[in-house]
Image (cartoon, helix red, strand yellow):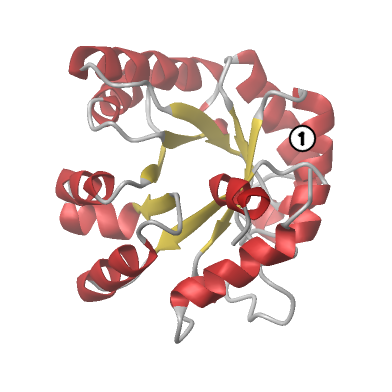
Amino acid sequence: MTVMQASYQDRIIVALDGEPADIFRWSHELAGEARWVKVGMTLFYLSGPAIIEELKSLGYKVFLDLKLHDIPHQVEGAARRLGRLGVDLITVHAAGGRAMMGAALEGARKGAEEAGKTPPKVVAVTVLTSMTNQTLHDIGVSDDTNTQVDRLMRLASEACLDGIVCSPHEAAAARSTLGGGAWIVTPGVRPAGADKGDQSRIMTPADALNVGATHLVIGRPITDSPNPKQAYREIINAIANIP
């Protein structure tokens, strides 16, 4: 892997979703190769803070994706405790509103300061990549996904969050609205020919970066591979030389 290609390791977040034995194998196999991993609700609710400590000991940056969504007081308390863990990125639901998102940001900063750690980036989930226009209509949102994402990303910006999570199909609009410094984290990214699983709005890694994404969350195309390290390297090679 060239020096130029190595810089792209900071843009790929490997989602660790599976049984504990699988997580152990993947995280050790990819250590020193991948720089970011994502811990979602299933893994965190099973293993708790111990999994964060283990992954940090392996040298990873950790995206803890719990999608906080509650009244501001509860979200601030939860984010404060997550900030103490030394994670690098956390999520809240933009649908919780400006006050809730601001409380998450404040809590994360307080928790990190108390533990002597760097505060995590806080990004807002807009519309889940599994959702379609019909899904939104089913829950009473009459607008389409693009309009709803735009509304929620503006709320996140007003709350001074570090960025958003959206489908790669909304990444270009997000970049235009939020400017060059915002984190635009995109799940729903699959290499060409890969099974799209339960994602509805997907794009290839190269295309997602080209339209404005800063970080790509990719799980099963890497972890379901017989050789996760090789699958990871192939994705890095496919995005080489993209600004």
Q: Is residue 159 left or right of residue 41?
A: right
Residue at the spot 48% in from the left edge and 28% down from the top edge: 122
Question: Where is residue 77 drawn, in percent x and y?
Answer: 26, 22
Q: Quadrant of residue 243?
A: top right
Residue at the spot 29% in from the left edge and 12% down from the top edge: 110
Instruction: Name the amino acid, label 1.
Output: Ala
Question: Where is residue 119 drawn, in percent x and y?
Answer: 37, 21
Q: Is residue 25 visible?
A: yes
Q: Nearer the viewer, residue 197 or 33?
A: 33
Q: Quadrant of residue 68?
A: top left
Residue at the spot 73% in from the left edge and 52% down from the top edge: 168
Residue picked out by circle 1? 174
In the image, is residue 124 above or below residue 166? above
Q: Is residue 97 left or right of residue 29?
A: right
In the image, is residue 172 above or below residue 196? above
Q: Nearer the viewer, residue 6 or 144?
A: 6
Task: Count up the numbered dots.
Answer: 1
Label 1: few (<14), some (14–19) or many (≥20) C-alpha neighbours in 10 Å: many
Q: Describe the element under mark 1 as helix, strand or loop.
A: helix
In the image, is residue 112 above or below residue 94? above
Q: Is residue 201 visible?
A: no
Q: Is residue 179 left or right of residue 84?
A: right
